[in-house]
């Protein structure tokens, strides 16, 4: 991934932004304004937004225009995602949103320490890069994408490291959902601290 230079106080690289419903995890069903940042150094083989991996100067968007779009939408809930959003300094974006009383959530692999204080930290670790220690401490929600049945044991290893208040979710990788959902259900029955997360936005065909 190529690095680009920009003014972190006033702009940030964005692949797309849109107003929809949160489709997965703890906040499922809630109206949410998504800000999908461009750029990723993790590179999950099953990523469903590989187009978010690369970044270019053409994708720079001003923080003020993003905040204006959120306010215009009418929601008070923003999800900052990617790509890998924590690879950037997010403090200026989050401060600008907080000044408008916007609740900020992030979806991150946890491989970078977070700049900026979010209201909700969704930690989704990946096997392709190890997360930092901070991710386990900050996580409000541990969401593990299950691509293979062995990932269930791997998920438990992460669950043992997160803080005691962190909620635990298992989410089947979309292309293998029919195969994996029965396995995940059986696992949750035997390990009731976990919950099932489904990508409901894909079932109902919304962004």
Image (spheres, rainbow, N blue to C red):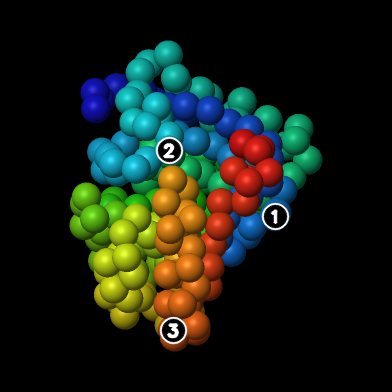
Who's the residue at 48% across and 63% down the image?
Answer: 181
Nearer-the-camera pick, 162 or 200:
200
Question: Does 51 sit above or below residue 45?
Answer: above
Determine whether label 1 and label 3 are within 8 Å by CB. Answer: no
Residue 8 image point, x, y percent: 40, 31
**Who comes first in sequence, dot 3 or dot 2?**
2
Label placed on residue 154: none
What's the distance in space between the residues labelled 3 and 2, CA to CA? 28 Å
Q: Quadrant of residue 126?
A: bottom left
Q: Residue furthest top?
A: 58
- Residue at label 2? 48
- Residue at label 3? 191
Can residue 118 be seen in this snapshot? no
Quadrant of the snapshot with the C terminus: top right
Determine whether label 3 and label 2 are within 8 Å by CB. Answer: no
Local SS, label 2: loop
| Pointer 3 local density, CA inside 10 Å: few below 14, some 14–19, many at least 20 | few
**Who comes first in sequence, dot 1 or dot 2?**
1
Local SS, label 3: loop
What's the distance in space between the residues labelled 1 and 2, CA to CA? 20 Å
Local SS, label 1: loop
Residue 57 image point, x, y percent: 37, 16
Who's the residue at 24% across and 55% down the image?
Answer: 127
What's the distance in space between the residues labelled 1 and 3, CA to CA? 25 Å
Quadrant of the snapshot with the N terminus: top left
Nearer-the-camera pick, 31 or 183:
183
Nearer-the-camera pick, 49 or 14:
49
- Residue at label 1? 29
Question: Does 102 sit above or below residue 188?
Answer: above
């Amino acid at each position: 991934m190529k690095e680009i230079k920009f003014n972190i106080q006033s702009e940030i690289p964005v692949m797309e932004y849109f107003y929809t419903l949160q489709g997965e995890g703890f906040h499922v069903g809630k109206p949410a304004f998504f800000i999908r940042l461009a750029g990723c150094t993790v590179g999950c083989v099953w990523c469903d937004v590989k187009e978010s991996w690369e970044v270019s100067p053409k994708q720079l968007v001003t923080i003020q225009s993003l905040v204006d779009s959120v306010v215009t939408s009418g929601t008070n809930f923003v999800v900052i995602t990617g790509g890998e959003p924590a690879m950037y300094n997010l403090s200026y974006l989050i401060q600008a949103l907080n000044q408008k009383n916007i609740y900020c959530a992030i979806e991150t692999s946890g491989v970078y320490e977070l700049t900026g204080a979010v209201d909700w930290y969704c930690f989704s670790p990946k096997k392709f890069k190890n997360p930092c220690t901070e991710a386990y401490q900050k996580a409000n929600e541990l969401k593990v994408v299950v691509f293979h049945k062995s990932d269930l044991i791997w998920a438990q290893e992460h669950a043992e490291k997160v803080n005691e208040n962190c909620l635990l979710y298992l989410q089947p990788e979309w292309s293998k959902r029919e195969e994996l959902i029965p396995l995940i259900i059986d696992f949750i029955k035997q390990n009731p601290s976990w919950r099932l997360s489904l990508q409901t936005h894909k079932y109902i065909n919304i962004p």
